[in-house]
C-alpha cells in the first residue's frame, strides 16, 4: 500500500495476518483517545530482544496491540527495516521466531492502546515503517494525541495525500516527507515544530535514533545506557516512556528527555558518549500530565524526575489531611483502611501513615484479592467487557471486612461503574459502613492529550453535577471524599520537586494547548 503526495511517495508496510472479529465479543466501539508506550534501542547486540523486554515493561500503557521494527543490514550493506506487529499483549504478538527474524543492532517498539476509528485495523498499529525520498528508511512510534490533528489532516487531504490509517501519529510521516529541508534530521525537526498537543516520539532512521518530547512535556520519556552491550563492547542506548522498561533491560537511567527537546543518538554518541540536542519552540509553557502520577504510570517508574510511588504516597497523606478517618462508636472495632489494588496501593500507604500521625484509630489491611490474570478494566474497549472484568478481577476478603467500618482508597473515579460494583462487593462481605476516599479530584472533563476519557457526559462527577450527596447515594457509600485540585498540585509538586507545571485539564476543564475541533478531532 502506498501513501502518496505531490512531493513524495513512500510505502507503509502492513502485516497480512487476519484480525479476530470484535463483533464476536459483542463490543460496542466507542471513541477513545490513544495512550501508548514507546521504546527505542540503538547500537545493541540483539536489539529486538532488548526492545521486546522493554515493551513488556511498558505493557501497562497499552494492551490492545504491539509492534517492533529492527534495522537489518543485508549482505550488500544496505539497510532493510523489518516490521512485526499485531493485536494483543507483547507476549502474544511476538513468538521466539518472530523476534529472531528481527535482527540488527537498532530497533524501536510500541505498545498500543485503543484509538478511535480503528481498534482492530492493523494499518493503525505502530511503529509505522516507511521508505521515502531516494529510499531513505524511517520508523516511528508515538505516545500522545495531536491537538491540531484535524487541521493537519485537512491540509494533507486538500493536497491530495492518500492516508493509510485514522491514527494521528501517521501525520508525522506526512509532515516529515513534505518538509522542504534537505537533511533527514532537519526534516524531522521541521515536522515536530508543526505538531501541537501531546507527543513523545521515537524515530529510527538508517543512522540515527531520535527521541522527541513535545514542548509542554505532557507524556514522559527518558534516556538510558546499556553499558558494554553494543558490538565489540561498546555502549548501547535506549529511550523509553518509563524507567521501569529500563530496569527490565538492565539499562542505566541517564536522564529524562526535557519538554521540547529533540535528542539524536548516532555513531558519535557511541564513540564519545554525547548526544546532539535541539530545542523545539514553545508556545504554551509546560504542562506535564498529572494523571500519570495519579494512575497511569507504574509505581516503580521514575517520571518527570521522581519516583511515582513517592508522589502517590504524598497524595494519600494529603487526602488524609483533607478527609480524615471517621470516628466510630465506643466499643466498635477501629476502621480498616484498604486499597483498590493495584494503582491505589501506594496512596493508601500514605493515607494510613498520615492517619496514624494524626492519632486516628485505624488499621491497614488488604480487602480484596486481585486476580492477576485479568487486565485493567479502565482500558477495556467497551463497558460490557469492563463490567465482566471487574467481577472476574476482585474477590472481597470477608475476614478483613465483616463487621468493620471500611475506608476504601482509590486513585480516581471515571465512569463510576467499577467503584459501585466494588462497594457492593465490600457490603456483601459484611462491612458495617463504607467510606470512599479518592486520591485525585473529580474527573470532570475529557482528555485531548492522550488519556482515555471518552466524553464529558460519561464522566461520573458530571452525571450528578458534582453533588456529593447524590453521588454517595448512587455509589451506596456512607461518605465520599475527593482530593482537592489545589491539594493534588501541592502534593505532587512537593514530592516530585519538579520545576515544571502540571496539566490538570481533566479536573478543571482548563486546557493548556488549544484543541482544534474539540470533541471530534479524531473523526476522520
Image (cartoon, rainbow, N blue to C red):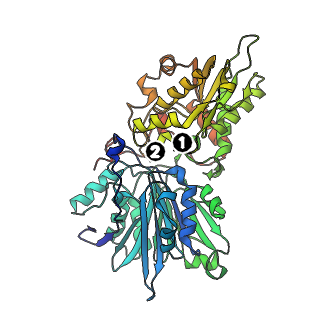
Is residue 294 positioned above or below 212 on the image? above
Is residue 438 positioned above or below 26 on the image? above
Residue lying furthest bottom: 76
Front one among 312 and 103 = 103
Q: Which residue is mark 2?
A: 451
The answer to whether residue 200 shows anywhere in this view is no
Across and down, in percent, residue 278 comes to: 51, 66
| CB atoms of marks 2 and 1 within 8 Å | yes
Which residue lies at the image location 21% right of the left edge and 63% below the top edge?
A: 160
Across and down, in percent, residue 163 comes to: 28, 61
Closer to the N terminus: mark 2 or mark 1? Answer: 1
| Circle number at residue 291 | 1
Which residue lies at the image location 69% right of the left edge and 31% below the top edge?
A: 351
The answer to whether residue 131 shows anywhere in this view is yes
Rendering quarter of residue 7:
bottom left
Q: Element at badge 2?
A: loop
Q: Element at badge 1?
A: helix
Gap in Å between the C-alphas at discs 2 and 1?
9 Å
Amino acid at each position: 500500500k502506498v501513501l502518496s503526495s505531490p512531493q513524495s511517495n513512500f510505502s507503509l508496510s502492513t502485516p497480512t495476518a487476519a484480525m479476530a472479529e470484535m463483533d464476536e465479543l459483542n463490543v460496542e466501539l466507542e471513541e477513545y483517545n490513544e495512550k501508548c508506550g514507546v521504546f527505542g534501542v540503538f547500537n545493541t547486540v540483539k536489539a529486538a530482544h532488548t526492545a521486546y523486554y522493554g515493551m513488556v515493561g511498558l505493557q501497562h500503557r497499552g494492551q490492545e496491540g504491539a509492534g517492533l521494527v529492527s534495522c537489518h543490514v543485508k549482505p550488500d550493506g544496505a539497510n532493510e527495516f523489518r516490521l512485526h506487529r499485531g493485536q494483543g499483549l507483547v507476549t502474544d504478538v511476538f513468538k521466539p521466531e518472530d523476534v529472531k527474524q528481527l535482527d540488527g543492532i537498532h530497533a524501536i517498539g510500541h505498545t498500543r492502546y485503543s484509538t478511535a476509528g480503528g481498534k482492530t485495523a492493523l494499518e493503525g498499529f505502530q511503529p509505522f515503517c516507511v521508505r521515502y525520498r531516494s529510499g531513505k528508511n524511517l520508523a516511528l512510534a508515538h505516545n500522545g494525541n495531536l491537538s491540531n490533528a484535524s487541521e493537519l489532516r485537512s491540509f494533507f487531504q486538500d493536497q491530495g495525500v492518500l492516508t493509510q490509517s485514522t491514527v494521528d501519529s501517521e501525520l508525522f510521516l506526512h509532515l516529515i516527507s513534505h518538509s522542504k529541508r534537505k537533511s533527514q534530521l532537519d526534516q524531522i525537526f521541521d515536522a515536530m515544530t508543526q505538531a501541537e498537543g501531546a507527543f513523545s516520539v521515537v524515530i529510527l532512521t538508517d543512522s540515527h535514533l531520535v527521541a522527541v518530547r513535545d514542548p509542554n512535556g505532557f507524556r514522559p520519556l527518558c534516556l538510558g545506557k546499556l553499558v558494554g552491550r553494543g558490538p565489540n563492547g561498546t555502549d548501547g542506548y535506549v529511550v523509553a516512556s518509563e524507567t521501569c522498561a529500563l530496569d527490565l533491560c538492565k539499562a542505566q537511567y541517564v536522564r529524562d528527555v526535557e519538554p521540547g527537546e529533540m535528542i539524536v543518538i548516532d555513531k558519535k554518541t557511541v564513540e564519545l558518549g554525547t548526544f546532539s540536542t535541539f530545542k523545539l519552540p514553545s508556545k504554551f509553557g509546560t504542562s506535564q500530565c498529572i494523571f500519570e502520577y495519579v494512575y497511569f504510570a507504574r509505581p516503580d517508574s521514575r517520571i518527570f524526575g521522581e519516583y511515582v510511588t513517592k508522589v502517590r504516597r504524598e497524595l494519600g497523606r494529603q487526602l488524609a489531611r483533607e478527609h480524615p478517618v471517621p470516628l466510630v462508636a465506643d466499643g466498635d472495632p477501629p476502621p480498616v483502611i484498604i486499597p483498590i489494588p493495584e494503582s491505589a496501593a501506594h496512596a493508601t500507604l500514605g493515607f494510613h501513615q498520615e492517619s496514624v500521625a494524626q492519632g486516628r484509630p485505624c488499621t491497614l489491611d488488604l480487602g480484596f484479592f486481585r486476580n492477576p490474570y485479568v487486565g485493567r478494566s479502565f482500558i477495556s474497549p467497551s463497558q460490557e467487557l469492563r463490567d465482566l472484568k471487574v467481577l472476574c478481577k476482585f474477590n472481597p476478603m470477608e475476614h478483613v471486612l465483616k463487621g468493620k467500618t471500611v475506608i476504601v482508597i482509590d486513585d480516581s473515579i471515571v465512569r463510576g461503574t467499577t467503584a459501585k460494583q466494588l462497594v457492593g462487593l465490600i457490603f456483601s462481605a459484611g462491612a458495617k459502613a463504607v467510606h470512599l476516599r479518592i486520591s485525585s479530584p473529580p474527573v470532570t472533563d475529557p482528555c485531548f492529550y492522550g488519556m482515555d476519557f471518552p466524553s464529558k457526559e460519561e464522566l461520573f462527577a458530571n452525571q450528578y453535577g458534582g453533588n456529593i450527596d447524590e453521588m454517595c447515594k448512587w455509589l451506596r457509600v456512607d461518605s465520599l471524599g475527593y482530593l482537592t485540585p489545589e491539594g493534588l498540585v501541592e502534593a505532587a509538586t512537593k514530592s516530585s520537586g519538579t520545576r515544571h507545571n502540571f496539566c490538570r485539564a481533566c479536573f478543571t476543564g482548563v486546557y493548556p494547548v488549544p484543541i482544534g475541533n474539540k470533541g471530534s478531532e479524531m473523526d476522520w
